[in-house]
């Protein structure tokens, strides 16, 4: 009897411990169930209200990305409340995405986030450079200012109206960086290095077309990416081999192609390329108005006597040979025209009407007669 009485407290403690463990397990299961319910029913379907809390988050949409594939990122960065809310909104709209970078905000409603992701005006890091565009803005006589490449790039870096990499900052990066840091191709390094303090030292080295870049990168990184990708695009045309066949350096080919781009009407690129090569061979000045315009404050098709008399590194009325640098970004068609010029002995050409009709001649008197036709048709009139 004494032994049984001594064992009773031990059994009692064991039962109490078992009850406590069972209660704890029950509470744990209730907690887990509640957590799962909360995650599925609340967090899993949560949708914030409004257009965000003001904290900007840049989101990349890459090639092949869909709303489904980027939804986890949007949730993780606290841009949208849940994947389900975003996909529910997307299904209602049948929305699709374009590559680029998009400035969104934390805690946006699924509807507001989708609006921002499908608004082309909200897309950043995608610059579309037209053929024949120079780096700097161009002021047209009697007209408006056309934005240059620096301005187009700057506009694509803005996460908000007041947060952009400015054109001046991009210029500073170009001037302060070595050709190696900018990944200037080997065939252009010497020319770029020789114009160390000139923001236009990389003129012609950013190819026309659509470029995708990271707008959150440094100015140097942005310019390096654009120059590197453009060099690969130019070289893919067979530039290096063609330069040897034509008798120019690869950099001179880009320079000459920029003249073709600015001077030649559609359908005559290869003929203008031949005129350039013929004049260079005969040591005759090119006398292209586009090279005069490159360094004047206000531009138009015609140039003045004073403009043509100015000695600049580009004015081919005042100097023999090609300009020292390209005067714009040549498109692939213009470059291919230099790589495969037409056969002909022409030394002169002039567009004689506003439909773009262009006359090619070797005889100077015939060329003068064509110029008179152009003047009569108002093509060469100056507004200055």
Image (cartoon, rainbow, N blue to C red):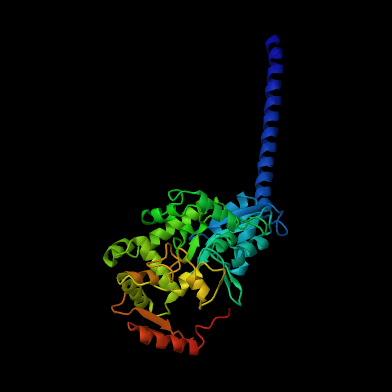
Q: Residue at x 68, y 11 (%)?
A: 3
Residue 225 can be seen in this image = yes
Identify the residue at the far top of this view. 2
The quadrant the C terminus occupies is bottom right
Does residue 289 lie above or below 125 as drawn? below
Q: Position of residue 135 (x, y in %)?
A: 51, 63
Taking depth in this image into account, of 342 and 295 the one nearest to the observer is 295
Looking at the image, residue 202 sits to the left or right of residue 75; the answer is left
Q: Residue at x 70, y 33 (%)?
A: 23
Q: Residue at x 73, y 59 (%)?
A: 50
Q: Position of residue 282 (x, y in %)?
A: 30, 72
Quadrant position of residue 249? bottom left
Residue 131 can be seen in this image = no
The quadrant the N terminus occupies is top right
Q: Position of residue 45 (x, y in %)?
A: 66, 55
Q: Residue at x 52, y 87 (%)?
A: 378
Does residue 306 lie above or below 244 as drawn? below
Taking depth in this image into account, of 313 and 84 the one nearest to the observer is 313
Looking at the image, residue 3 sits to the left or right of residue 222; the answer is right
């Amino acid at each position: 009897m004494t032994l049984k009485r001594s064992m009773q407290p031990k059994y009692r403690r064991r039962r109490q411990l078992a009850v406590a463990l069972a209660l704890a397990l029950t509470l744990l299961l209730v907690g887990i169930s509640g957590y799962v319910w909360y995650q599925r029913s609340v967090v899993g379907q949560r949708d914030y209200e409004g257009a965000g809390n003001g904290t900007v988050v840049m989101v990349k949409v890459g090639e092949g990305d869909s709303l489904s594939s980027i939804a986890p990122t949007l949730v993780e960065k606290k841009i949208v409340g849940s994947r389900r809310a975003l996909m529910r909104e997307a299904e209602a709209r049948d929305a699709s995405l374009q590559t680029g970078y998009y400035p969104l905000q934390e805690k946006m409603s699924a509807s507001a986030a989708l609006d921002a992701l499908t608004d082309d005006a909200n897309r950043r890091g995608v610059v579309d450079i037209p053929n024949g565009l120079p780096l700097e803005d161009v002021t047209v006589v009697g007209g408006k200012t056309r934005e240059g490449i620096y301005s187009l790039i700057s506009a694509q870096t803005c996460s908000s109206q007041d947060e952009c990499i400015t054109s001046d900052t991009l210029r500073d990066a170009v001037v302060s960086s070595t050709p190696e840091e900018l990944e200037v191709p080997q065939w252009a390094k010497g020319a770029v290095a020789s114009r160390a303090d000139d923001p236009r030292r990389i003129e012609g080295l950013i190819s026309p077309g659509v470029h995708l870049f990271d707008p959150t990168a440094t100015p140097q990184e942005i310019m390096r990416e654009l120059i590197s990708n453009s060099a690969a695009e130019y070289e893919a045309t067979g530039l290096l081999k063609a330069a040897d066949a034509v008798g120019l350096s690869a950099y001179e080919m880009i320079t000459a192609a920029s003249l073709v781009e600015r001077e030649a009407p559609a359908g005559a690129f290869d003929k203008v390329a031949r005129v350039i090569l013929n004049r260079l061979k005969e040591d005759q000045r090119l006398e292209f108005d586009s090279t005069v315009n490159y360094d004047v404050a206000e531009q138009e098709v015609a140039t003045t006597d004073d403009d043509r008399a100015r000695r600049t590194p580009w004015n081919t009325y005042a100097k023999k040979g090609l300009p020292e640098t390209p005067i714009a970004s040549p498109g692939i068609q213009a470059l291919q025209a230099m790589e495969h010029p037409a056969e002909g002995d022409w030394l002169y050409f002039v567009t004689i009407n506003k439909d773009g009709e262009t006359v090619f001649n070797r005889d100077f008197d015939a060329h003068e007669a064509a110029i008179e036709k152009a003047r009569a048709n108002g093509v060469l009139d100056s507004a200055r």
